[in-house]
Amino acid sequence: MTATSGTAAESGRTAWRNWAGNVRATPARVVTPASVGELQEAVRRAAAEGLRVKAVGTGHSFTAAAATDGVLVRPQALSGILSVDRAAGTVTVAAGTALKDLNRALAAQGLSLTNMGDIMEQTVSGATSTGTHGTGRDSASIAAQIRGLELVTADGRLLVCSEKENPEVFAAARLGIGALGVVTSITFAVEPLFLLTAREEPMRFDRVTAEFDQHVAENEHFEFYWFPHTGNCNTKRNNRSQGPAAPPGAVSGWIEDELLSNGLFQAVNSLGRAVPAAIPSIARIASRALSARTYTDIPYKVFTSPRRVRFVEMEYALPRERAVEALRELKAMVDRSGLRISFPVEVRTAPADDIPLSTASGRETAYIAVHMYRGTPYQAYFTAAERIFTAHGGRPHWGKVHTRDAEYLAAAYPRFGEFTALRDRLDPDRVFGNDYLRRVLGD
């Protein structure tokens, strides 16, 4: 991207809130730059006025990572594929591009990301900056698929970063929580479009936990959901396929993905919120509603699902060898408590990567995510779950609810000091700071 002159569209104080509705902020102004040059000027102006700057995508984080009372940057005008290098196997995309638009555009060109999360509403910069991930034995998070990026720093410079150019910034800024600057473009590794066969199958909790390592080893992508108040789980195994494509039928796909996973799920959660005592009975019925199915399709149609029921989420990354023990402790805690949990618990995996603040940095990882329906009190459940996760060396997802601070995180991340030293160099005046970053990174 090249810098151009101009003035970013801006507006005065307007309340902003995230997707889940649990974070709100009132920035002094909101800017919508139409070019990198406009973004650079907006950052310089804010710094001169003593205002902080935060970029926000679609607000799918559950933390206040993007909240500010200063200048809120909406990068959605910086969108679209900028270039494709088929020989190098890369695509460069503007930072405000939604993952759903990127996935569809790549598929139209016969290309795909190797792995992705199950939601594709986020912008590419928001997803990578907070560590969005899917599940994979060998393939890692979206940030780990970055091969280059461009970043506007606190003094308004545009840094071009890769393993060869500004490599120390590249290493950290792939997952920077917005602390190092505003990302303007990202170059991802891509590969020719391929097919995945998904096999979804109900399984008992005791069996799936006993066979967890086997399932991870035997499948390229394995995940499962446990339904609290029951011993029931739903497993999903995604593996590459030679084809042919055999997507879910229009009717059966609608029943599973819309009626059961969204429409009926919305209704039972609303009932559970109104009558918490009914939740265990609802859970037993809901956990039996999804049946086994197998289908084959292109990656984003297998990896991702519509998520229309709003919730609040906490997720911790644990050393993979500790995950089953932690999950059993979580189940025992729920069983003996008076908690009423209407959302399933999600378990996924990731290989070790080399990104300083990645939740999988330097270790094979398993993720355990707990959710509560929006508007339902979640603090008691999350507090009890967090106590278990931290006892097993867990690292909280940067974009999901947690209470950890810099002291805890410095011990959890061997390269934490490397990141904070780079932050001190790039943003000594904390132009990109906010209360969340002060808590998790120190000041």
Image: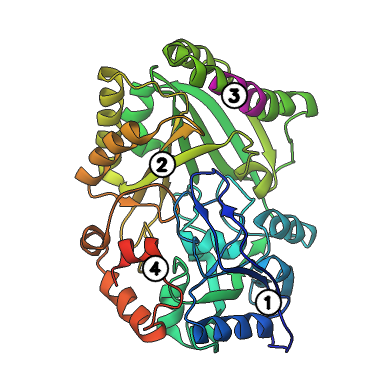
Badge number at residue 216? 2
Q: CA distance from mark 4 to mark 3?
A: 36 Å
- What is the distance, in whole Å, between disc 3 and disc 2 at their CAs? 28 Å
Helix, strand, or loop for circle 2? helix
In the rendering, which numbered label is found on residue 273? none
Whether the magenta-drawn stretch holds residue 329 is answered as no
Circle 3 SS class: helix
Q: CA distance from mark 3 to mark 1?
A: 45 Å
Q: Earlier in the sequence, mark 3 or mark 2?
A: 2
Q: Nearer the viewer, mark 1 or mark 4?
A: 4
Q: Which mark is residue 355?
A: 4
Q: Which residue range is magenta in the image?
A: 260-269
Q: Badge 1, how many Cα within 10 Å: few under 14, some, many 20+? A: few
Query: Which of the two discs, 1 and 4, labels the residue nearer the N terminus?
Result: 1
Residue at coordinates 56% horizontally, 68% vertically from top-left?
28
Query: Left or right: 172 with respect to 90?
Result: left
Numbered disc in front, either 4 or 3? 3
- Earlier residue among tags 2 and 1: 1
Picture coordinates of residue 119, whole percent (x, y): 59, 46
Residue 40 versus residue 342: which sits nearer the camera? 40
* Residue 287 appears in the picture as rendered: no
Give the labeled residue for mark 1. 87
**Gap between marks 1 and 4 measured at Cα:** 25 Å
Residue that appears at 31% across and 23% down: 334
Report the disc number at residue 265. Answer: 3
Q: Secondary structure at mark 4?
A: loop
- Alpha-carbon neighbours of circle 3 within 10 Å: few (<14), some, or many (≥20)? some
Callout 1 amino acid: Ala
Answer with mark 2 or mark 4, whichever residue precedes in sequence: 2
- For the residues labelled 1 and 4, say whether their Cβ atoms are less than 8 Å apart: no
Mark toward the start of the polypeptide (3 vs 1): 1
Mark 4 neighbour density, 10 Å: few (under 14) some (14–19) many (20 or more): many
